């Protein structure tokens, strides 16, 4: 009887290790660096160098994946245990997946994290064709998730990534287990047309370091705590970014769409956020069936940078 039990234990252990190896090997085919990252373009190489510099701030091991699909190649940064529950991250405008450097340690300690660079912005994703509407972009995300074999996952989106995350969750309500929106832009209310918005527009049109510092002073309550390397990456991205037609589509989601977000949802905004305010959360609570909301004190629009420790804690408690 003991011998039989020993064989069962050994056989079960081998199955577990074989499963882990098979799962890892499936992603290994996506680790080859694509040729476009070595393009002979001074501005692009300067941007990639800045990106790599910010990734030095990541305190955990990670793997770069380059996943080809019909619309173009997706750069996905993967961190965390192979067998942990999957968690997908969608970054803010011109921020790239490198922006998660203050959050990745805690998130990847509990989840298998997949941070996807938006293909319509500077990053390490690369389109094959024009992606000029959100429908095509959603198909791109869905094909990436299929290739990653993520049948169910939780989803976090910040700012513009919050709007995209909400759109994706509406399309995949059976796959998105939980949804976290960090100051989602243009999702519940229009961005208030104030002085800060004008500063943002001017910076996007004519990006200079002086305007960047002014912008971050309005978007963050602690701009002095944000890594200079990240500021440089953000600035390089803005100089490279083209007109994003999807940005023109971004407007508050209608009631009938928001009602489809039936999964447990957490919405966090900063108390000094220039993109959202209490009305954002009031509308979410009035329409969405399963939502928690909070205004984070001493935080601006970049609340995952301003109050990283607190935001990490709230996300993990929710998930």
Image (cartoon, grey):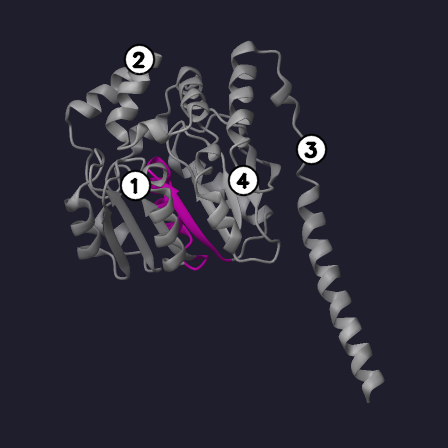
User: Magenta region: which residues?
Assistant: 152-176
- Which tag, 4 or 1, sits closer to the chain's start? 4
Mark 1 lies on a secondary structure that is loop
Q: Is residue 239 left or right of residue 108?
A: left
What residue would you read off at disc 3? 32
The residue shown at (31%, 56%) is 260
Front residue of 207 and 139: 207
Q: Are marks 4 and 1 in contact (CB under 8 Å)?
A: no
Label 2: state its secondary structure: helix
Residue 210 badge? 2
Q: Quadrant of residue 259?
A: bottom left
Q: Position of residue 126 (x, y in %)?
A: 54, 27
Q: Give how far across and how far down residue 158 sits, in percent.
A: 36, 40
Q: Which mark is residue 184?
A: 1
Instruction: Report the front residue among 239 and 252.
Output: 239
Sooner in the amino-acid sequence: mark 3 or mark 4: 3
> Residue 304, image x and y in percent?
36, 40
Precedes in sequence: disc 4 or disc 2 = 4
**Which mark lies nearer to you, 4 or 2?**
4
Separation of disc 3 and disc 4 at Cα?
A: 23 Å
Label 2 Cα neighbours within 10 Å, binned few <14 / some 14-19 / many ≥20: few
């Amino acid at each position: 009887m003991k011998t039989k039990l020993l064989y069962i234990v050994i056989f079960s252990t081998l199955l577990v290790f074989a499963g882990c190896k098979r799962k890892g090997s499936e992603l290994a085919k996506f680790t080859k660096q694509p040729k476009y990252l070595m393009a002979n373009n001074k501005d692009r190489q300067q941007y990639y160098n800045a990106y790599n510099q910010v990734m030095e701030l990541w305190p955990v091991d990670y793997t770069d994946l380059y996943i080809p699909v019909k619309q173009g190649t997706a750069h996905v940064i993967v961190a965390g245990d192979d067998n942990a529950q999957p968690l997908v991250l969608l970054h803010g405008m011109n921020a790239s997946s490198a922006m998660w450097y203050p959050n990745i340690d805690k998130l990847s300690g509990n989840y298998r994290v997949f941070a996807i660079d938006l293909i319509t912005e500077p990053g390490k994703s690369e389109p094959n064709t024009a992606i000029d509407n959100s429908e095509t972009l959603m198909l791109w995300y869905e094909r990436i998730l299929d290739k990653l074999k993520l049948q169910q996952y939780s989803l976090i989106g910040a700012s513009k990534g919050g709007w995209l995350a909400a759109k994706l969750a509406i399309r995949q309500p059976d796959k998105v287990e939980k949804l976290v929106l960090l100051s989602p832009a243009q999702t519940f209310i229009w961005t208030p047309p104030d002085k800060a918005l004008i500063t943002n527009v001017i910076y996007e049109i004519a990006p200079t370091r002086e305007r960047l510092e002014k912008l971050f002073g309005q978007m963050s309550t602690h701009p002095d705590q944000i890594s200079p390397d990240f500021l440089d990456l953000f600035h390089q991205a803005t100089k490279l970014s083209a007109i994003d037609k999807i940005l023109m589509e971004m407007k508050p989601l209608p009631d009938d769409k928001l009602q489809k977000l039936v999964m447990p949802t957490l919405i966090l905004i900063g108390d000094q956020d220039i993109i959202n305010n209490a009305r954002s959360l009031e509308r979410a609570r009035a329409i969405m069936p399963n939502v928690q909301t909070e205004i984070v004190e001493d935080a601006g629009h970049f609340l995952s940078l301003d109050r990283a420790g607190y935001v990490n804690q709230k996300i993990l408690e929710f998930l």
